[in-house]
């Protein structure tokens, strides 16, 4: 009988947290979705740049127009209260109520729902972001999930009931309940520095 490999093991959230804690360089990063282990290599500089721009734009927006929310960036261990899930969205928004629960000592385990999740595609994460994690976010009722693709300069926009994404080529829009105005982000500006001439 052959030895079990990681492909034949159902991973728990605690197992994944131990893998991440044992990695002194913090890369690769490990996640699991319904027991499936996902491994992400160190991000490229352009990936970090796009994620950072999304983070700054969303943070500016919630501080101005939706003060009941907070914006975070990976690394973070979001498990939705499940013991077979732990994911690290590139950027995500939670309610201040959930954020306060985490500050009281419950940490990331207190996060049971996201208002918005954003993943920036890279070669190493493309399948997981578009399929495994997308299905998780839909099943957990995340109202809006953006899969941002710097290569095509587009974004997939997913809602919980969608079978296929809406492909956005110009502007990302998010109007959460209770917000004074919608969030908008111009995709051309988001990707501009990646393709500018030196």
Image (tube, grey):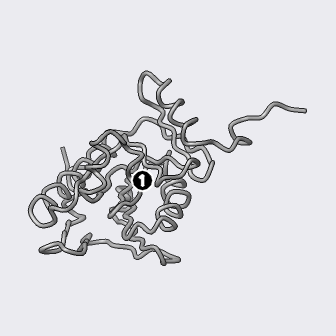
Please identify the quarter of the rendering in which residue 149 is found: bottom left
Q: Is residue 67 left or right of residue 166?
A: left
Q: Is residue 13 left or right of residue 98?
A: right
Specify the farthest residue to the right: 1
Residue at the image position 16 percent from the left and 65 percent from the top: 66
Q: At which x and y percent is residue 63?
A: 11, 58
The front one of 76 and 165 is 76
Specify the farthest residue to the front: 104
The front one of 183 and 106 is 106
Specify the farthest residue to the left: 64
Q: Secondary structure at mark 1?
A: loop
Q: At which x and y percent is residue 44?
A: 37, 39
Q: Is residue 35 above or below residue 171?
A: above
Q: Is residue 12 above or below residue 62?
A: above
Residue at the image position 71 percent from the left and 41 percent from the top: 9
Where is mark 1, residue-wise?
121
Q: How many marks?
A: 1
Q: At which x and y percent is residue 56?
A: 18, 51
- Quadrant the N terminus occupies: top right
Q: Is residue 55 above or below residue 160?
A: above
Q: At which x and y percent is residue 156?
A: 40, 68
- Quadrant the C terminus occupies: top left
Q: Is residue 54 above or below residue 14?
A: below
The front one of 183 and 96 is 96
The crowding category of the residue bearing disc 1, from other C-alpha atoms within 10 Å (few below 14, some 14 to 19, many at least 20), is: many
């Amino acid at each position: 009988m052959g030895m079990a490999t990681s492909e034949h093991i159902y991973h728990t959230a605690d197992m994944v947290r131990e893998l991440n804690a044992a990695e002194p360089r913090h890369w690769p990063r490990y996640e699991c979705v319904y027991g499936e282990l996902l491994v992400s290599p160190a991000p490229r500089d352009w990936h970090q740049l796009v994620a950072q721009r999304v983070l700054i734009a969303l943070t500016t927006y919630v501080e101005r127009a939706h003060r009941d929310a907070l914006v975070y960036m990976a690394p973070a261990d979001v498990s939705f209260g499940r013991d077979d899930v732990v994911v690290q969205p590139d950027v995500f928004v939670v309610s201040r109520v959930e954020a306060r629960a985490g500050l009281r000592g419950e940490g990331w385990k207190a996060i049971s729902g996201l208002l918005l999740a954003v993943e920036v595609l890279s070669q190493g994460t493309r399948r997981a972001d578009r399929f495994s994690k997308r299905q998780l976010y839909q099943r957990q009722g995340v109202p809006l999930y953006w899969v941002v693709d710097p290569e095509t300069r587009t974004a997939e926009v997913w809602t919980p009931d969608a079978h296929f994404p809406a492909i956005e080529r110009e502007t990302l829009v998010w109007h959460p309940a209770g917000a004074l105005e919608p969030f908008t982000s111009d995709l051309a500006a988001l990707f501009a520095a990646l393709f500018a001439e030196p």
